[in-house]
Amino acid sequence: MIDMNHTALVTGASRGFGRAIATALATAGAHVVGVARDHAQLEKVEAELGDSFTPIVADAAEPATAERLLAQHRPRILVLNAGAAPLSVPLQQHTWETFSRNWQVDVRQAFHWTRQALSLPLAPGSTVVTLSSGAALRGSPLSGGYAGAKATIRFLASYAADESERGGLGIRFVSLLPQLTPATELGLGGAAAYAARDGVDLETFLARRGPALTPDQVGASVLQLITTTDHDHAAYLLGPTGLTPVE
Ligand SMILES: NC(=O)c1ccc[n+]([C@@H]2O[C@H](COP(=O)([O-])OP(=O)(O)OC[C@H]3O[C@@H](n4cnc5c(N)ncnc54)[C@H](OP(=O)(O)O)[C@@H]3O)[C@@H](O)[C@H]2O)c1
């Protein structure tokens, strides 16, 4: 269980992985502050989680959002999960704007919140989990700059872990690299594009890949990362069979 007095802040908490992470943390006893841009979606999460959830409508990629919400809530658990759905088309069909979408949202968010977590700083014993992707290791040829953006996020978390140690801050920074799953809006778009590229229907594509990661497994794994006493690793791959440290 998490200490009941601890606040967790989850970006992108309105659906997909973020909603499941918020649910896992609230169920374990944390008060969860959930950030997203769509008020109606956040209200649905609040209806489910009740008093243990505070919805905040904000753009997580804006530096002022990180500054304001970290100063206001001082979370002991921070999950930087919000991410843009990449445009899933071959490289030559991208513009620079579509190619760099995940840099403008995912990396921008990770940079501002991580920087702010170190500068405040968050309390010793705090944990910051940032959502990278399995694509950071293998590439993602139909998603423009997505894989590079997610690789940068992993670097950012490791640089922050180093700064925390050098400064004696006691803040743990971990990145999580989930496998592609059709169980969220973002993942379904990617899976459908790769199925079309392979010339098969989505069902056939998914059957070939085997069991898929579920949002509930992501929520449980984030909880596991936060509560484990094993702090030897800074990055973990996540598939349907669980967490694997990335060396
Ligand atoms: N699904 C996969 O297969 C997969 C695999 C590896 C990694 N990931 C990563 O896991 C994370 C969650 O993905 P998901 O599949 O759960 O995606 P999703 O279902 O599309 O949910 C994305 C969440 O992020 C929020 N969001 C997007 N831009 C935002 C912004 N600028 N400010 C605040 N909130 C924002 C969305 O809410 P609003 O639109 O209302 O703001 C939503 O709550 C992402 O970082 C993604 O790259 C996903």
Image (spheres, helix red, strand yellow):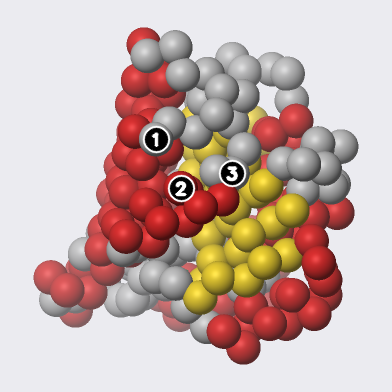
Q: Residue 136 location in percent, x, y?
A: 39, 45
At 73% across and 82% down in the image, what residue appears? 44
Which element is circle 1 on? Answer: loop
Q: Return the residue nearer the eye: 154 or 89.
A: 154
Tell me how far mark 3 sits from mark 2, CA to CA.
9 Å
Q: Is residue 166 left or right of residue 52?
A: left
Query: Could you tell me residue 195's position as x and y percent?
Result: 50, 75
Which residue is identified by label 1?
Answer: 120
- As displayed, is residue 71 above or below residue 10? above
Amino acid type, callout 2: Ala
Q: How many marks?
A: 3
- State which tag comes first along the sequence, 3 or 1: 3
| Residue 92 visible somewhere in the drawing | no
Q: Residue furthest front?
A: 72
* Type of the residue with mark 1: Leu
The residue labelled by disc 2 is 71
Residue named by callout 3: 75
When the figure is inspected, residue 5 is found, relative to residue 144, above or below; the finding is: above
Is 146 displayed left or right of 34 in the figure?
Answer: left
Task: Tell me residue 54's x, y (percent).
Answer: 67, 66
